[in-house]
Amino acid sequence: MANTPVSVPDLGGIDEVEVIEICVKPGDNIEQEEALIVLESDKATMEVPAPFSGKVTSIKVSVGDKVSTGTQVAEMDQINSEEVANEANELQAPAQIEEVEEQSTVTQTDTNEDTEIDIIVPDLGGIESVEVIELSVTEGDSFSVEDGLLVLESDKATMEVPAPSDGILISFSVKVGDKVSEGDRVGKMKSSASTPASSVQIPIAEKSVQAPKEHPPKTLTSEPMVSSGKVHAGPAVRKLARELGVDLAQVSASGPRSRIQKQDLHDFVKQKVNASVGTVGVKGSDEDFSKYGTITQQPLNKIKQVTARNMVASWSTIPQVTQFDEADITDLEHYRKTKMPSLLEDGVKVSPLAFITKACVKALQVFPEFNSSLGPNADELILKQYYNIGIAVETPDGLLVPVIKQADSKGVVGLAKESSELAKKARDKKLPLDAMSGASFTISSLGGIGGTAFTPIVNAPQVAILGVSKASYKPVWNGEAFEPRLMLPLSLSYDHRVIDGAQAARFTRYICDILSETRHMLL
Ligand code: CAO
């Protein structure tokens, strides 16, 4: 049926309530029972749910409007109008809308000042049992009359049980998650008000128990991260918050009387997701490039996606600096080319990489903090007594980093063989997972390709990575003349939380010195 009016259900005696949230907009398709608007009285919040599944055609109220039983709040088109034609005349929201009366009761056990009184669940307006969703104060907290002591929630309504007088909480006898019913005793408080005789039911809405404020109310909002009675949110928002695992105490409220709206929750989650994108995800562009010209799309394989995530995580969490230097490898290259076998078995060559790996191990032994990781709270350094060197390998599917384990126990030829085998396995997709774990330092060599320098990204949780570029002859002043020397560019990126610039310069220089003196390599 088209444009069926939806009205405020029976408010159980309350004259007027305020519209505090509009949860839908015209054109929205919603399910039966989904909230259309949220209403609030002084102490209770309730949703007006959709009486049937259908399309919202108009909203008749605005946030801040006062409405009463029977006020029309929206119009909806029913999805299957034939089935419900008979219901057309009675489209007030269904009876399960729980209105929570503003009546809470206390049972007083003494008439003196500072007397102990029980905190009792008030009239729940016909609802049998509700859940305790917040204990808003803790033992010893002082509060003022009307401050929320605990929050109860049914499927569709949330209510605070307010303090019947100024007082101090002695204890709660319930915990969050407990189900309670009208009349249940949920705790004890010490009242500082002079109140009527024992066993009198005191409607909280009546301010008859107001007393001089001997105990200044505790500012609950000053307690960090604790869900408190100062968090105001409707049942739909609370439900969504629970589903998303969001602590409402952390969400800024934009609604009237500091009430958290659904949009606030969405904004909060969006903000968190964006903030954590660096550690958990990779964000691309949502721009439509096809408006500028022809495009094709190519899915990224798993290796590239994982690499992207790791890079983003490292880049966004580690303050990285790159130190550049050059090693004179003229003599080393002469040695390699004349003294090393040109080909080992299976066509394996001893490339400069094997010497660089050996030099790195020696440097790591002298500068142990480069062979470390930061502890979980970033307040301690975990120094590794093993030297497992990751070698970045380019494969058709992307970058893989197999690890030469116990590189300190291997000679140059052994290192050359192993890195060559690992690179082959990586390219043949035969690398077992454990061959890529446990590295304590990484080398990324682009020396076989070209380039003068680059800034590799630290392979977290390691703290440093050595980039190697292509060696080239350069004129070097020997004190008397320029000499052509083969210079190898090195780029060391490091975690500046762990390593100081001076240490990085010394470490890189040390590697250069080792590579410059062939005899080091023969040890
Ligand atoms: N300077 C000059 N020449 C170099 C050199 C250097 N720094 N490093 C290697 N070479 C030479 C080698 O001697 C070899 O020459 P010959 O064929 O004449 O002997 C040639 O370049 C090719 O070497 P290579 O690249 O096949 O072998 P490698 O041992 O140097 O490197 C590996 C092996 C696996 C590191 C390499 O193949 C590779 O995949 N590199 C890419 C790594 C990468 O993508 N890094 C970027 C990651 S982002 O940080």
Image: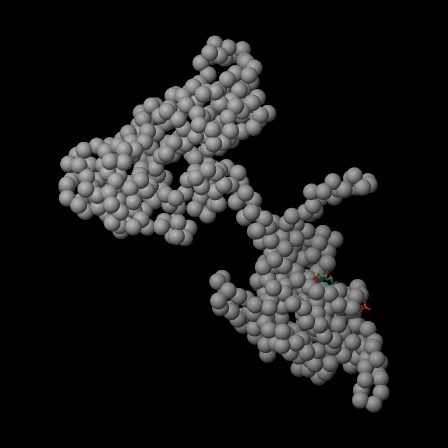
What percent of the width, then of the height, locates residue 64?
A: 47, 32
Please tell me in which quadrant of the rendered image residue 448 appears.
Answer: bottom right
What percent of the width, then of the height, locates residue 153?
A: 37, 34
On the question of residue 435 being in view, the answer is no
Q: Please identify the residue farthest to the bottom as the structure is shown.
A: 480
Q: Is residue 338 above or below residue 226?
A: below
Depth order, front residue of 39/208: 208
What percent of the width, then of the height, locates residue 85?
A: 50, 10
Depth order, front residue of 247/490: 247
Depth order, front residue of 475/262: 262
Q: Quadrant of ligand 1?
A: bottom right
Q: Please identify the residue farthest to the front as the structure is shown.
A: 212
Image quadrant occupied by the N terminus: top right
Residue at (50, 64) in percent of width and height: 378
Q: Is residue 355 left or right of residue 372?
A: right
On the question of residue 130 being in view, the answer is yes
Residue at (15, 36) in percent of width and height: 197
Depth order, front residue of 296/74: 74
Q: Is residue 113 above or below residue 400?
A: above
Q: Is residue 402 above or below residue 343?
A: above
Residue at (28, 29) in percent of width and height: 123
Image quadrant occupied by the C terminus: bottom right
Q: Is residue 70 left or right of residue 482?
A: left
Residue at (17, 45) in percent of width and height: 113
What percent of the width, then of the height, locates residue 203?
A: 26, 32
